[in-house]
Image (cartoon, rainbow, N blue to C red):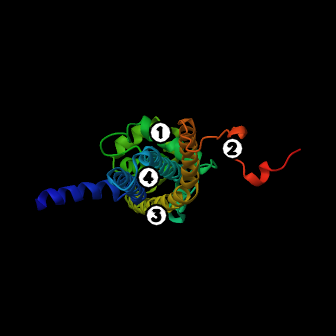
Amino acid sequence: MSKIYNNILNKIWKRYAPDVGKSLIHLGALGWFLSSAAQLGMIISNKDIDKKEKQFLVPQEAADGCINVGLYYTICQAIKKGGDALLERGKIIAASTLETINSLKPDSNTMPKYLKAMSDAFEESSIIGNDNIKSSGRLNNFLNGSIEFLEKTKEEQTRIMQNSGILRSTFEKVLEQSDGKELRNTLTQSLKDYSLFKNGVGVITAVGASILACNIITPLARNYTASLYQKRALKRQNKLPKTENNKPVFYNYNQIPVSKTFSGFRI
């Protein structure tokens, strides 16, 4: 039993350790789901709540649950993906990673353009996209592709650079002066620094997105949905036949007994 438990924990660790922000989003969505399911179950099983009230409360609570989980997940995921895209394009970058890339960048192209050109060159050269390199973004591809390229033999490096101008202008002078081992170690350290930096930014964006979703957008959507269900319930009640307990009374004034005092008057 402990072996199965450890295997499950290892799989969870491998999945979420590189991206803690993703784990926060998934755990938050799971928490919303369990909370909504518990609230819905309480309403259904509570015998003190009238059936007519349940007809209104059950669909409203189910709608609230869908809004809570759906909006929370989509908003958080969208904001986090936006942050990851800014990181991968080099628009948000750690100082150490920026310094390393600037030491290699041969021209005055902007960082996003240079990273895209290098990522495309590595992909065309089949350096990334295989089992060893995971193609997950421009900056990731640049760092992983550069490390993989510098691990190849001199003959392979020369062949690859002949078919790519951007790779030749980036690595040719470096490889003429050294075997590239020092640069490979520097890029490996930059990859570790970038992974930690990306993980931290992912946590910040996930927390910020959850605050936005839970405290601003989701309550507004829930209030709007609740008002719609309330209006439907009121319309349903108004359509029910009304039972009138008090019937109008019509008097026959000729049959009403009159006091003798009044009958003594003559006009």
Residue 127 spot, x, y in % from top left: 38, 41
Residue 31 spot, x, y in % from top left: 38, 57
Determine if residue 183 is in view: no
Observer-side mark, 2 or 1, equals 2
Please give the residue where the numbered disc 2 appears in the rendered image.
Answer: 256
- Which residue is at 40% across, 61% downward? 192
Q: Are marks 4 and 3 in contact (CB under 8 Å)?
A: no
Q: Are marks 1 and 4 in contact (CB under 8 Å)?
A: no
Sort mark 3 into few (<14), some (14-19) or many (20+) by Cα contacts within 10 Å. some
Q: Earlier in the sequence, mark 1 or mark 4?
A: 1
Q: Amino acid at mark 4?
A: Leu
Q: Secondary structure at mark 3?
A: helix
Q: Earlier in the sequence, mark 3 or mark 1?
A: 1
Left or right placement of residue 241 versus residue 16 in this view:
right
Q: Amino acid at mark 2?
A: Ile
Please give the residue where the numbered disc 3 appears in the rendered image.
Answer: 200
Q: Secondary structure at mark 1?
A: helix
Observer-nearest of 79 and 194: 79
Q: Which label was assigned to residue 40?
A: none
Cα separation, mark 3 vs mark 1, equals 29 Å
Please give the residue where the numbered disc 4 appears in the rendered image.
Answer: 143
Sort mark 2 into few (<14), some (14-19) or many (20+) by Cα contacts within 10 Å. few
Residue 83 spot, x, y in % from top left: 53, 53
Q: Are marks 3 and 1 in contact (CB under 8 Å)?
A: no
Q: Earlier in the sequence, mark 4 or mark 3?
A: 4
Q: Secondary structure at mark 2?
A: loop
Q: Earlier in the sequence, mark 3 or mark 2?
A: 3
Q: Earlier in the sequence, mark 2 or mark 4?
A: 4
Left or right placement of residue 104 versus residue 15 in this view:
right
Residue 204 spot, x, y in % from top left: 50, 63
Sort mark 1 into few (<14), some (14-19) or many (20+) by Cα contacts within 10 Å. many
Observer-side mark, 4 or 3, equals 3
